[in-house]
Image: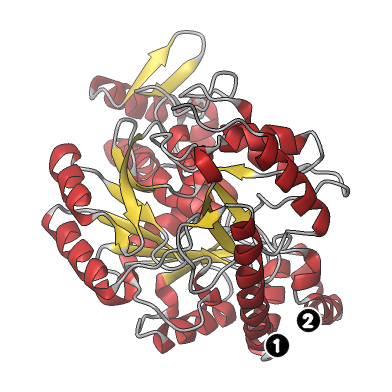
Amino acid sequence: MTEGSRTIKVMEAIRHRLATRALMPGDRLPSIRRFAVMMGVSPSTVVEAYDRLSAEGVIRSRPGSGFYVVGAAPSLDLRAPEPLREREVDPFWVSRQSLDAKPEVLKPGCGWLPPDWMPQAAIRRALRALARGPDALLTEYGSSLGPPNLRRILARQFAGEGLDISPETILLTASGSQAIDLICRYLLRPGDTVLVDDPCYFNFQALLRVYKARIVSVPFTPAGPDLARFAEALAAHRPRLYITNSALHNPTGGTITPQTAHRLLKLAGEHDLTIVEDDTFAVLEPDLSPRLATLDGLERVIRIGSFSKTLSASIRCGYIAGQTDMVAALTDLQVATNFGGPGPVPSEIVYATLSDGSYRKHVEGIRRRLSRSRKDVASRLGRMGIEPWLMPRGGFYLWCALPDGRDAAEIARAAMQHNIVLAPGNIFSPLQAAASFMRFNVSQMPERAWEVLDLAVRTAPPKPL
């Protein structure tokens, strides 16, 4: 290999890292000596490659510091969240209160099921079997795509929904959140526009802020996104992505209708829009609703999901299903940033529970239990003047309007004084248009939570006229 071809090899290696978002604007490149060792070339070859990339404006030198990718690094300034919000309507505050809660704290505002709703016996069986397995299961890294046995099970499940894909087009990730992170890291550049629903899952907004994306929201209706407003947003903002839950939408519990799904995909095709469909809650549906990924055949829809809500939040394992070339690029990116996806331990536990028939029975039991809880909680909320926006087909959320337009943040603040974490509406609303709404988790409503909620609602001041 000539010196010139070695230089090109180094340049292409850096360009590949940029393309897969392993290197982002503002990131420091490896030192000349270190990169020379990594690439198996001489330091002078790396110097030549860095100089050429600097001349192209791809990287730049900072004397005494090294070489950096051109542009500002994506960052999240937690000291001054943008926009500045009260702590009770800041999603990070609500998340931390739920995640760091002491045992005595109740969490009607959290986004998961209680421990006694989860298949603990099946998980313990899988752990015992894992402990008797090969040593490598307990000590080695996982494969780049994730174990084939689990990907085959997922492919069979998708085929049952009408989405016939190869296990090679499924990438296992460390979590559902990491799946979205990889996609955003791969597809977005600072300043790109991303469409989300209003309201939407608050962590979508938090992650997009990390990548300095411009967030544009579209009102969510009981049938799905408002298509007239959706079309206007596409024409006006030319967004790169749309991120949504089409089944059991978080926080509203709504489900997209077939008519809305078909028109949405037509608009996406006309405007070259990529859709990320988060299917995390969909297994809790009593029967199958339209899936954008299935209708589209993964042409411009990327499907993601995880098992945190129905199996265990402690066993972190998610997935991405998409086009072959994109999955290959995301696999490289996951190797670069996390040295692979979930390890053998969580992957094998998920595989064991999905393959022995217990998971299907467990999910069926959760659906029945949640159906009763939704009715009971909705009835009791109604007696307090709190009305569900709609009655979901499944899932564990009720998105509710408070009586007389009362301020949800004020009620959340009062409840926190009694060790009750609530989820006020504006943490889900990019436009801060849900001040009198609250999301309730029907599986996390013990009697003491009702007592505190009743007091907080009765004593909260009505919305000023």
Residue ID at (81%, 75%)? 120
Residue on which disc 1 sits? 358
At which x and y percent is residue 272? 17, 54
Residue ID at (45%, 71%)? 170
Mark 1–mark 2 CB contact (< 8 Å): yes
The quadrant holding residue 94 is: top right
At which x and y percent is residue 20? 38, 47
Front-lying residue, 141 or 258: 258
Q: In this view, does 390 lie above or below 339?
A: below
Q: How crowded is mark 2: few (under 14 residues within 10 Å), some or many (20 or more)?
A: many
Q: In this view, does 426 lie above or below 197?
A: above
The quadrant holding residue 346 is: bottom right
Residue ID at (74%, 39%)? 415
Q: Residue 122 carries which label?
A: 2
At which x and y percent is residue 438? 56, 47
In-image side of 217 versus 178 (left or right): left
Q: Residue 101 carries which label?
A: none
In-image side of 94 versus 114 (left or right): left
- Tally of marks: 2
Give the Cα separation between the discs numbered 1 and 2. 7 Å
Query: Quick check: can you spot residue 189?
Result: yes
